[in-house]
Structures are given as C-alpha cells and as structure tokens.
Image (cartoon, helix red, strand yellow):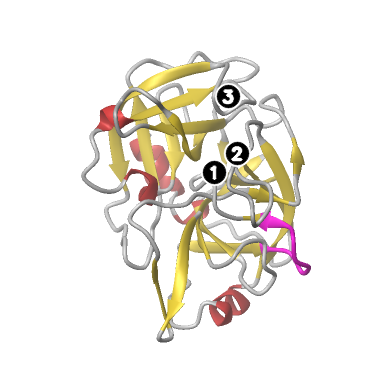
Amino acid sequence: MKKITLLLAYLTVASAFPRQDRIVGGTITSIQTYPFSAVLLFSRNNISFRQNCGGSVINNRSMLTAAHCLNGNINLNNFRVRVGSTNASSGGSVHNSALRILHPQYNQGTLNNDIALLRVSTAFQLGTTVRPAAIIGQNVVIPDNTLIWATGWGWTTPSGNNPSEQLRHVQVRVVPQQRCQRAYTGFPITAAMICAGWDQPGRGSCQGDSGSPIVHNNVVIGATSFGQRCADPNFPTVYARVAHFTNWIRSNA
C-alpha cells in the first residue's frame, strides 16, 4: 500500500517507492487457499531480490498488480515474479519480467486508475498452487459493509519493520464511498476505487504489499493501492476497484 500524508488539506504521495501493505490483525494462510496470489520481487542491483509488492495471477503469462508498483524509470530486469508458494522468499517458481502494461489513465499524483499488468518471460505452470484468479465482472457492485478478505505478505503490526515470510489474510468490510471520501478530504476517492477497513483498531492492510488482492467469495475485487496510517478505523485502505477495469484486464492480459 502506498502511504500518503495529509498536508494543507491535500494528500500527497509520501515517497517515490511505495511502502507496501502489510496485513495487521490477520492470520497465516496458504497458497492453496489463494493459489492466484503472486509476489512481485524487486532488486536495485539484479542480485538480491526481495518482496516489494503483491499481485494476482490472471493467466499463464500475466499478473495483476498496482500501477505504482511498476511505475517509474525502472528496468524490467529489476522485477521478478514468484508464484506457487506460501513463502515470499522461497518455494514455487520465479519468473523474469517481459512487459509491463500500466493503465493508460493511471495518475501517479492522485493514484486514480492504480492498476497494471506484468507479463512474464516464461509461462506459469498452472496447478493446485498456481491458478488464474476469478475476477469480478465489469461494473459489478459489492454492497457496502460486505465482509471480504485482504491478503498479502508483509509486516504484521503497525510498528513492525519486518515483513511476514508467510502469506496472511484478514477479514475487513467494504466501507461506503462517502465515508471513505470524508476520511480523505481533499484527495479524490473515485469510481475506480473501493475502500475497506474495520470498525476497531488493529485490523486491516498497511505498508508491506501493494497490489495484493482483496477477495470476496474467492473472486478478486480489488488491488491494494494506498492509505493513511495503519489499520486505523478512521482511515480505510483504498484499493483499485477491479470491476472498473475488468474489460481492460481481459483485453490486455
């Protein structure tokens, strides 16, 4: 999740590279439960790769993630994708990147349309631990207060600084768009976004895994985008609303 900071009634991006979402108040799960989950690995020197973002397997060649994970003048060789493993740094298979496709209307200032696809150079071997995600239909609406699951690899406490090695998930609720907009006064919460959180502190997404999916009834409905504070009921996490992009995803994956 990209962290944003409130300044003079306007929220701006806090850093050039996202401090990704972590799952706070959740539990360890497995790749068998979320076989479409993928780890986006990043290295500045092309030697030591580490988990930087998350994503969802769309087919045997493409991963869905947040555009801000791939934006910038960064060589594709700096990115790799791990699939088929509960662990962020071991197991499964690792694939080099071949092509990144950012949504043409992505805005890095407002994080509107924060969605992207990353194609890999070698096909994912589909099976019990690597399966394409079911994605929500175009313009399908998930009702407010619906219980959903946020997933990811990352820090497990608001004050932590070490990511979780194992995939985790936590249950949260869809937050009404108007309430989310009030929380982020001056920063547009658009139709391309969906918000989710919890009524009490200590549960939700936070820095450690941008691009990771939120899921309802085993269907991917969002990709983690940004937030303010960590697992704070006053500031829901904002996700790219997949239903806004379903046709684009299917056409480009």
Q: Is label 3 in a helix, a strand or a loop?
A: loop
Amino acid found under the numbered disc labelled 2: Trp
User: From mark 2 to mark 1, how far is it between C-alphas?
Assistant: 9 Å
Question: Around disc 2, counting alpha carbons within 10 Å, would you say few (fewer than 14), some (14 to 19), or many (20 or more)?
Answer: many
Answer whether residue 158 is visible to the viewer in this image. Answer: yes
Q: Is label 2 in a helix, a strand or a loop?
A: loop
- Disc marking residue 212: 1
Q: Could you tell me residue 124's position as x and y percent? A: 46, 17
Q: Quadrant of residue 79?
A: top left
Residue at left 38%, top 58%? 113
**The C terminus sits in image quarter:** top left
Question: Around disc 3, counting alpha carbons within 10 Å, would you say few (fewer than 14), some (14 to 19), or many (20 or more)?
Answer: many
Compared to residue 6, the image places residue 153 above or below, namely above
- Disc marking residue 153: 2
Residue found farthest to the bottom: 8
Amino acid found under the numbered disc labelled 1: Ser
Q: Are marks 2 and 1 in contact (CB under 8 Å)?
A: yes
Compared to residue 80, the image places residue 232 above or below, namely below
Q: Decide which of tag 2 and tag 1 comes sooner along the chain.
A: 2
- Disc marking residue 131: 3
Q: Quadrant of residue 13?
A: bottom left
Q: Could you tell me residue 117's position as x and y percent? A: 37, 39
Mark toward the viewer: 3 or 1: 1
Q: Nearer the viewer, residue 66 or 42?
A: 42
Q: Nearer the viewer, residue 195 or 77?
A: 77
Q: Could you tell me residue 207's position as x and y percent? A: 55, 53
Image check: 200 left or right of 62?
Answer: right
Q: Decide which of tag 3 and tag 2 comes sooner along the chain.
A: 3
Image check: 88 left or right of 170?
Answer: left
Residue interval drawn in magenta = 197-204
